[in-house]
Image: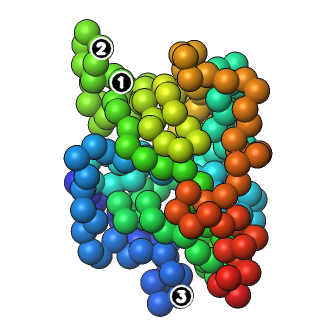
């Protein structure tokens, strides 16, 4: 299933030109599945929210980034699955390539599938299929429960909503997507990564 779902990722990229991982080498799967959020200063700035599911990173582009306020509904546009080793990718994609712009590893860590703990347990793949995903994130900036809902706003299949669950980790005052801008991988901001690689 993994390689099948990477077809779209591979078709969009020329690996002679982009420094992104080709997915050719199999990244080590960890004991606990991981999530990663990458800040991506592309033609329009956004955050890429990715969850490891069955050996790939299932991905959404979140224009405003995740919020810790359960009242905020953040548009999350489903994008192509990415290879697992993309979780460590930080660098500059050339301007004329797909997704051209700088990428930083904004947050990441292990996560837990909360739907697997319900009375009628669902795997991540089943949750994706039903369009309702609940996960507990253990990141540096993001911790606690988050929900992704396949709301299909405007009739568009790609449109999901990302929302903080209203648990003890909810915090309407902290705005990590605006105030905590350093990479958890290198401590650099997008501007510093861009300068370093120029
Ligand atoms: Mn992106």
Q: Is residue 181 left or right of residue 54?
A: right
Circle 1 — which element?
helix
Q: Residues within 10 Å of mark 2 (few under 14, many from 20)?
A: few
Q: Residue furthest top?
A: 119
Q: Is residue 90 above or below residue 38?
A: below
Mark yes or no: residue 195 visible: yes
**Colour scheme of the picture:** rainbow
Q: Nearer the viewer, residue 142 or 70?
A: 142
Q: Residues within 10 Å of mark 3 (few under 14, many from 20)?
A: few
**Which mark identifies residue 17?**
3
Figure quadrant of residue 6: bottom left
Circle 1/circle 2 CB separation < 8 Å: yes
Q: Which residue is mark 1?
A: 114
Task: Please report the residue visible at 24 percent of the width from the left and 56 percent of the height from the top.
Answer: 29
Q: Is residue 24 left or right of residue 18?
A: left
In the image, residue 39 lies at what x, y percent? 64, 57
Q: Is residue 144 above or below residue 42?
A: above
Task: Please report the residue visible at 74 percent of the width from the left and 57 percent of the height from the top.
Answer: 45
**Which mark identifies residue 94?**
none
The alpha-carbon separation of the residues under discs 3 and 2 comes to 45 Å
In the image, residue 94 lies at what x, y percent? 64, 82
Q: Is residue 77 left or right of residue 119?
A: right
Task: Please report the residue visible at 25 percent of the width from the left and 68 percent of the height from the top.
Answer: 26
Q: Which residue is mark 2?
A: 118
The alpha-carbon separation of the residues under discs 1 and 2 comes to 7 Å
Q: Is residue 26 left or right of residue 89?
A: left
Circle 3 — which element?
loop
The alpha-carbon separation of the residues under discs 1 and 3 comes to 39 Å
In the image, residue 53 lies at what x, y percent? 32, 45
């Amino acid at each position: 299933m993994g390689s099948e779902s990477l077809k779209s990722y591979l078709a969009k990229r020329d690996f002679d030109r982009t420094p992104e991982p080709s997915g050719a080498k199999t990244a080590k799967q960890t004991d606990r599945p991981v999530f990663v959020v990458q800040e991506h200063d592309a033609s329009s700035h956004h955050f890429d929210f990715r969850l490891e599911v069955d050996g790939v990173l299932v991905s959404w582009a979140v224009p405003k980034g995740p919020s810790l306020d359960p009242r905020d509904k953040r548009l999350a546009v489903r994008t192509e699955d990415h290879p697992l080793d993309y979780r460590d990718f930080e660098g500059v994609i050339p301007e004329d390539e797909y997704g051209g712009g700088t990428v930083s590893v904004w947050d990441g860590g292990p996560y837990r599938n909360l739907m697997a703990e319900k009375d009628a347990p669902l795997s991540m793949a089943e949750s994706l299929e039903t369009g309702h995903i609940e996960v507990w994130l253990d990141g540096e900036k993001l911790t606690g429960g988050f929900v992704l809902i396949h709301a299909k706003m405007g009739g568009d299949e790609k449109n999901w909503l990302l929302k903080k669950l209203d648990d003890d980790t909810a915090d309407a005052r902290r705005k990590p997507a605006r105030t905590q801008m350093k990479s958890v991988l290198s401590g650099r901001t997008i501007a510093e990564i861009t300068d370093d690689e120029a």
